[in-house]
Image (tube, grey):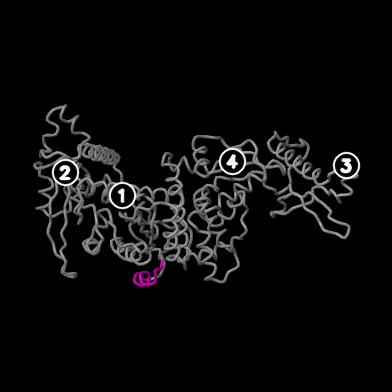
Amino acid sequence: MRLKYNQTAKGKCYYIIRSIYRDGKNTSEIYEKLGYLDDIKREHNCPDPEKWIREHLEQLNETEKAERNCKVLVPYDPHARIPLGTAQSFNIGYLFLQQVYYELCLDLICSHISKRHAFQYDMNAILSRLIYTRILFPGSKLSTCRSSKEFLEQPPFKYHQVERALSVIAAEFDSIQSELYKFSSQAVRRKTGVLYYDCTNFYFETEQEDPVSNQEADDNGIAARKYGTSKQHQPSPLVQMGLFMDYSGIPLAICINRGNKNEQQTLVPLEEKILQDFELSRFVVCTDAGLASEANRRFNNFGERSFVTTVSVKMMAKELQDWCLDPDGWQLEGDKDTYRIDHLEDTEEDREKNLGRTFYKQKYIEGYDAERDIEFNQTLIVTYSLKYRDYLRSKRNAQIQRALKAMEEGSSALEKKNANDYRRFVKRRATDQKGKEIRIKYSLNEKVIAEEEKFDGFYAVETNLDDDVHDILAINHGRWEIEESFRIMKDDFRSRPAYLSRSDRIKAHFMTCFISLLVYRILEKKLGEKFTCEEIIAALRGMRVTKAKDIGYTPSYTRTALTDALHEMAGFQTDYELIREKSMRGILRKSKKR
């Protein structure tokens, strides 16, 4: 409360006013009219009315402070029904996502987009709800509008505006990524010295692929749904996504391509955009064997760029393959001795000692890039691990058991065969019994099994770096995080199957999935990576408050170590027995503070 006066012909007329929040706005109202000094002196029998005013104001503020800190009784009427159509419970878990959203300055990015386009809806409100609901309540765009009403702050948009906003997001696909990288580098420490790249695809609930030609899709950046080889073996049209991730596990950039495009052709175009838009020039690109084409490696053998890529020992030339499988000449880190890997299990004591070790050897391969007129030298590093060998054998034995069971049942599925499933161990032979109907017999293909066993435990990478072997292997080891990012996007964020049909809105859908992944990963880092994705999402989804009349809100969730960590990270608390209206407004402001 504070003092105010109005100057009149009679003198100063004093009032005590207080600030209030009403109908979504901050305003003030008169709490008490004190009157003129002569009136106060006469009414309160005080010789110094100005001193009395100061003491009275101080007493009122102390009383208000005491009431704020005392226990509150909320009057509930057991015979009064709650208002029709008025929500009583709200999700507040999104506030922790909102804090990361505003730290990334996505509201500013939306403001920049709004200035470039002529629309009247609130782009920031739409994009933020697309992000929060993708993480907490994944579903369709119509579901987004419905789920947004679960949040404490109600959505100021309609469904048709969400659809229109998707087209704008698609049009700003590259600019959003460029600005997001700039702002995210200010919000978190990015490690862009090493970049991981991988591809995946998403299937759509339709039976018809888009009529766009492959060349037209590539030239115009159209996310055409095309039949291709699905990662989930779905017989549906696909759209392909390429993802760059930095060394700390935070997403960097994406590209969306037609579903039947060779993934090896997607690396260079996206990398060129990173070089131009993100102003990055010095980094190491790490990929799996599927992206280890000669062209990709030559592209990153220039300037300050380097590469580390997985290679298949099975697919090597005979000379290199024999060198990799040679049991002699293996080393351990920090040890000058050499070992023979065929003697690692001579005794039980040897096996116990060597089980957790990773042995390696390296070979320098000279080459030349005639196009650029520069050297193209590579180092082949191959590792061997008993633990990795045992894992592959255990996996294969389980597949062999499945194959045996399928042969006993005479399963017609044995007629089909994928590259890496159990059917590759089944040998098919047709026999003719003296002119009678041909019978097909199945048996285990021992030759295939023996051939695969030769490569158990071996793992190889090629690089043009001159670094220590341990550092190179550590870089390659980080690839698991990009695989986990794809799993989170597909399973936890339920980004597939997608039901959109327009190419621009398909691109916008995956852009919102990418931003959601970025927001989640940063939140995960801020929590110290102590909790799983399932635990974090379940906790945020369950954090709800119930409205307590016009007094405030009461939490209706279980306080846990995870909720405590979220509050400590965010700098505000929502787990008090009662959160007053004014306190909740302060929490909302803090969640939007950069």
Q: What is the crowding at mark 3: few (fewer than 14 residues within 10 Å), some, or many (at least 20)?
A: few
Residue receiving disc 2: 360
Which of label 1 and label 3 is nearer to you? 3
Residues at marks 1 and 3, CA–CA distance in whole angstroms:
79 Å
- Going by the numbered disc 1, the residue's amino acid type is Arg
Residue receiving disc 4: 574
Residue receiving disc 1: 479
Q: Nearer the viewer, residue 479 or 59?
A: 59
- Magenta span includes 218: yes
The percent position of residue 228, horizontal first and vertical second, equals: 34, 60
Residue depicted at x 50% and y 58%: 106
Which of label 3 and label 2 is nearer to you? 3
Which of label 1 and label 4 is nearer to you? 4
51 to the left or right of 291: right
Which of label 2 and label 4 is nearer to you? 4
Q: Identify the secondary structure beneath mark 2.
A: strand
Where are the magenta residues, as a range? 213-222
Which of label 4 and label 3 is nearer to you? 3
The percent position of residue 142, horizontal first and vertical second, equals: 56, 57
